[in-house]
Amino acid sequence: MTILGAVLTGGRSSRFGSNKAQALLGERSLAAHARALIAPHCADVVMIGGKGGVPDLPEPGLGPLGGIAGALDYAAEHGFRCVLTIGCDMPRLPDGLIEALLHREPSYCSDAPVLGLWPAALGAHLLAHLGLNGDRSVRGWARSVGAIPVSSPVPLANINTPADLETL
């Protein structure tokens, strides 16, 4: 397997009020749940952003694209062919969604575009995009590289507040 898993944990969590990645769902953090979802499909999984994680590129504060850029750079430096990214606030996914992404590259979940499979070779393109373009939309960048959108068969949980977490 030459896929690196990357859990994006560097968000500001401004609507959540505290570090969302470390919020607990049952006995585990949200980030740990996200990691467990992608780990079976990856040779290794790293945390991106946040304290102790692989740094966002070219700098923090650029949203999910900065995290994806950091993951692509890390993957290229460590010999991974692709990166499977997931947001830390995605503790549950429907059966088959990850597998559908893995059959196409690049690809992303049209319902939650931080969930995607990205060739590590796209790192330079993404850094150029971030440097030249004010558009920080994951969907916009994904379209620019010809990524294939994959729909989720059911609505995905959207955890932005503690109340959202309580509904799971």
Image: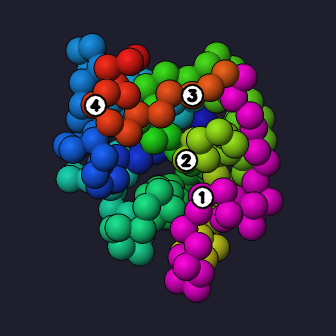
- On the image, the x and y values in percent for residue 117 come to 64, 45
Q: Earlier in the sequence, mark 1 or mark 3?
A: 1
Query: What is the C-alpha distance between the residues marked 4 and 2?
Result: 21 Å
Choose between 35 and 45: the one closer to the eye. 35
Viewer-side label of 1, 3: 3
- Residue underneath mark 1: 138
Q: Nearer the viewer, residue 86 or 1?
A: 86
Q: Residue at x 61, y 47 (%)?
A: 113
Please identify the quadrant where the N terminus is shown. top right
Q: CB atoms at circles 2 and 1 under 8 Å apart?
A: yes
**The C terminus: image quadrant:** top left
Reading the chain from its start, which is encountered first: label 4 or label 3? 3
Q: Residues within 10 Å of mark 1 (few under 14, many from 20)?
A: many
Magenta segment, which residues? 130-153
Earlier along the polypeptide chain: callout 1 or callout 4? Answer: 1
Q: Residue furthest bottom?
A: 132
* Residue bearing mark 2: 114
Residue 78: mark: none
The quarter of the picture where residue 136 lies is: bottom right
